[in-house]
Amino acid sequence: KTKVCVRCEKKIDDGKWVQMDGGRVLCETCWKNMYLPKCRRCNLPIEKQAVSSSDGQLKGKYHRECFNCHICHKPFPDKTFYVHDSKPLCAYHYHEANDSLCAAARCGQPIEGPCAVSHAGDRYHPDHMLCEYPGGCKERLEEYWEVDGRMLCERHSRVAQRDSDEEEDDGWKQSSRAMKRVTRYIDLANANVR
């Protein structure tokens, strides 16, 4: 007698079926879809080895080949990953989600550990928060002056103010005011403010 799956109502021609209570049968595909865990990436049943988190931060299970950064889909070559919103992320995308990428134009990389924070809330590696004077000063800023939206050392803030005061636009002088600012340091690894 030909068996028919109680769920999808298809004839079972390949001989692969599972008998349920009461003599009814499920085809192999329906049984897998009903009883095997689903991969959080592709939503297909996981038949063999699955990747999961023992600490509970990462919800669900993944096929090995589906376990990669939720945003860029790149694998984790050194088996290190981060969890944000219960999803696995690479270091870059985790720090992007947590606003902990270095704001220095030449860097843009994740910050782990000590971090310099500007008055505007931008975060930098401590060695990357430098004077932004166009001539290339690059002095590390503990205290700085903000002039026309740029962070400058004391010497270059005076130069920038003098240059700005000398510029004329339609017959009237513009004056850029220097605002003294203090760099705040935090340790992102421990979230301690110092």
Image (tube, helix red, strand yellow):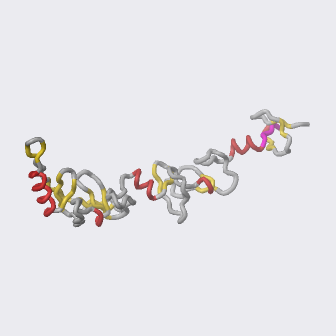
Residue that appears at 80% across and 35% down: 10
Number of dots carrying numbers: 0
Q: Is residue 113 left or right of 156 when viewed as pictured?
A: right
| Residue 92 occupies quadrant | bottom left
Residue 111: x, y in percent?
Answer: 37, 61
Asked whether 109 or 55 is in front, the reply is: 109
Quarter in which the N terminus is drawn = top right
Q: Which quadrant of the structure image shows residue 75? A: bottom right
Is residue 7 on the magenta stretch? Answer: no
Farthest-out residue, right: 1
Extreme residue toward the top, this view: 9
- What type of secondary structure mainly makes up the magenta span? strand
Residue 26: x %, y % from top left: 78, 40
Give how far across and how far down residue 3 sits, in percent: 85, 37
- In this rendering, the answer to whether 17 lies above or below 155 is above
Q: Which quadrant is the C terminus positioned in?
A: bottom left
Q: What residue is shown at x 52% (from left), y 50% (from top)?
A: 70
Magenta segment: 23-27
> In percent of the image, x 74 and y 43: which residue is there?
29
Residue sitting nearer the eye, 134 or 62: 134
- The residue drawn where x is 36% and y is 52% is 99
Q: Name the side, left or right, on which 180 lies relative to 2.
A: left
Q: In this view, does 40 lie to the left or right of 85?
A: right
